[in-house]
Image (tube, grey):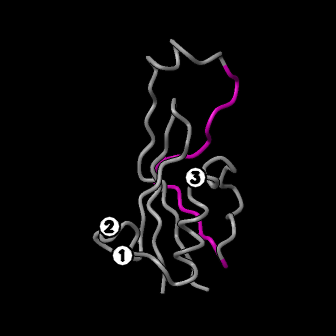
Amino acid sequence: MKTVRITAVRKVCHRDLMQRYENPIEHACDIEEGQVFISEDGKRPEGLCESAWGSMESFVKELSAGGGNFFDGWMKDPRSAMISCNDGFRPVSFYLETLE
């Protein structure tokens, strides 16, 4: 199995949507841009939220198994993927890449 690096590259906050639809919450996402996680054997890295993992798990497992080239040439590097978590108010975009 290959190691996969998961890097938080962008975090967006849709305040207008939060104000319109979200009930106030005390604790939201702790992920920061530039934060890096390492997945060994296709497993969720410690500290990566379970919701974000749910969005990327199948891609990480495929990359870990040596696969890639998702959607026939979607990414410039076929051994990578760009995945966003499923928080519609504070989505985080993660760059997944296979390490040699």
10 Å crowding of disc 1: few (<14), some (14-19), many (20+): some
Q: Amino acid at mark 1?
A: Pro
Q: Which residue is mark 2?
A: 75
Q: Position of residue 53 (x, y in %)?
A: 63, 55
Q: Which residue is mark 3?
A: 55
The span from disc 1 to disc 2 (Cα, nearest Å) is 6 Å
Tell me: residue 87, above or below residue 76. Answer: above
Q: Is residue 34 magenta?
A: yes
Residue in the picture at 64% in, 32% down? 28
Residue in the picture at 65% in, 73% down? 42
Q: Earlier in the sequence, mark 2 or mark 3?
A: 3
Residue 89 lies left or right of residue 61; in this view the side is left
Q: Which of the numbered marks, if any, corresponds to residue 17?
A: none
Residue in the picture at 59% in, 18% down? 22
* Residue at disc 3, secondary structure: helix
10 Å crowding of disc 3: few (<14), some (14-19), many (20+): some
Q: Is residue 4 magenta?
A: no
Q: Are marks 2 and 3 in contact (CB under 8 Å)?
A: no
Q: Amino acid at mark 3?
A: Ser
Toward which corner of the image does residue 44 lie, by quadrant?
A: bottom right
Q: Are marks 1 and 2 in contact (CB under 8 Å)?
A: yes
Q: Position of residue 3 (x, y in %)?
A: 57, 79
The region drawn magenta spans 25-41
Q: Main secondary structure of the magenta part?
A: loop
Q: Are marks 3 and 1 in contact (CB under 8 Å)?
A: no
